[in-house]
Image (cartoon, rainbow, N blue to C red):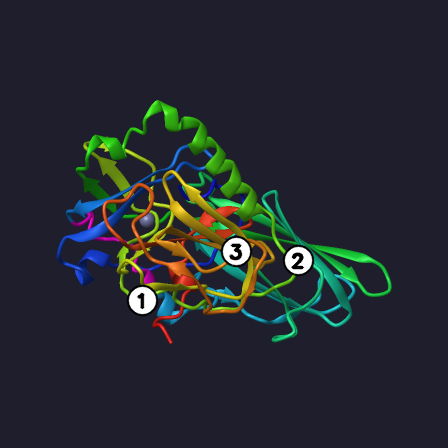
Amino acid sequence: MPAPDTPGKTMMISGKNSVMRRFPLPILLCLLLSVADGSVTLRAAARAAPPVDPAAPDVAAAAAERPASGAAKARTGVRRQEGRRPFTLDIPKSVGDGEAFALRFGAEGAQALDLDLDGKKLHIGAPSPASGFFEALLPVPLDTGKKRLRLALTIQWKGGGKEVLTRIVAVKKRDYPVQKLTVDSKFVSPPPEAAEKIRRDRAEMRAAVTSTSPVQYWRLPLARPVPGEVTSLYGSRRVFNGVPKNPHKGVDFDAAAGEPVAAVEAGEVVLVSEHYYGGNTVVVDHGLGVASAYLHLSGFNVRKGHRIARGDIIGFAGDTGRVTGPHLHLSFYVLGESVNAEPCLEAERR
Ligand SMILES: [Zn+2]
């Protein structure tokens, strides 16, 4: 049920480690089959065996080491002068697929910044009041076939004039874990009469995660939505009843039914709806192309249009939609692209 995949930005993550090492027992999984580009998403949950591949990305460890920019070595803030004026630009040299990365730009006299990452565009009308820099999150799509992405920055100078910088970001193919699961066939094949509902849900989700406020509400790291442990990683390759399905486009957290779910950051509630796969779903727009989605809720605590603060309770964990047990599925979008939220989250609930 995760929203459609569209171009977006993502935080970086890397490292290897297996969630199953931390959770050796069978865990309650959200079997979410999401289809990029607004196609099919299947959600179900079940008691499942540990992922077959123990070498899953160790997002938690990676996040602890570099919560803000995730990627490999950043090109740090050396002031360069390629054109008329000096500037500072921080971006990673390489980013894994399914990850977001942070960009930071600063220059005296810069009025606005337009970014174009392989066709995904973002306008930043002002620097972050907190840092004084122009900040952005940018996504590298899961399973992108590209080995490198071209990033163009167009600087709008105060008093007129523009300048364009280009950079190349290398894509590192991530080795996501495989999960083999056996579930009731009803979780894999929805009834024909559900097709129209599923189509509408997808369109609604896509619209919610691609329309974004021009104001930056987010800062990194993001708050954790629940105190529970992660039980299923983003990007897991899922094989249901022997049939390969779409990878898991979200992060599952252990959460009991009725447990409060907190917004990972301030923003505006742009979707409150009941979806076939996702169940009761809330989407929060955090600005500048960043959005979070909370699925399978047992109840809502916000309405569409509400402005909320970081940590506000948006609803309560549950097992609505295609799941077999209560948990929280968190999806994270950058410029409409589904990316791994985990590296962007703070290490522990505060
Ligand atoms: Zn899930």
Q: Is mark 3 within 8 Å of ligand 1?
A: no
Q: Nearer the viewer, mark 2 or mark 3?
A: 3
Magenta stretch: includes residue 142: no
Query: What crowding class fits label 1: few (fewer than 14 Cα within 10 Å), some (14-19), or many (20 or more)?
Result: some
Query: What crowding class fits label 2: few (fewer than 14 Cα within 10 Å), some (14-19), or many (20 or more)?
Result: some
The mark that comes first in sequence, 2 or 1, is 1
Residue 175 visible, this orientation: no
User: Residue placed at 23% from the left, 35% from the top?
Assistant: 240
User: Residue placed at 78% from the left, 70% from the top?
Assistant: 109
Which residue is the site of mark 3? 303
Q: Helix, strand or loop at disc 1?
A: helix
Q: Amino acid at mark 3?
A: Arg
Region of the chain picked out in magenta, as a range: 50-60
Residue 12 spot, x, y in % from top left: 44, 58
In front of the other: 214 or 184: 184
Which residue is the site of mark 2? 214
Residue 168 spot, x, y in % from top left: 56, 51
Q: Helix, strand or loop at disc 3?
A: loop
In front of the other: 27 or 100: 27
User: Residue placed at 45% from the left, 67% from the top?
Assistant: 222
Residue 42 visible, this orientation: yes
Q: Are marks 3 and 1 in contact (CB under 8 Å)?
A: no
Question: In the image, is 49 to the left or to the right of 238?
Answer: left
Q: Amino acid at mark 2?
A: Pro
Tell me if residue 283 comes above or below residue 65 in the rendering: above
Q: Nearer the viewer, mark 2 or mark 1?
A: 2
Q: Amino acid at mark 1?
A: Ala
Residue 49 spot, x, y in % from top left: 15, 47
User: Residue placed at 20% from the left, 48% from the top?
Assistant: 51
- Residue 61 - label: 1
Query: What crowding class fits label 3: few (fewer than 14 Cα within 10 Å), some (14-19), or many (20 or more)?
Result: some
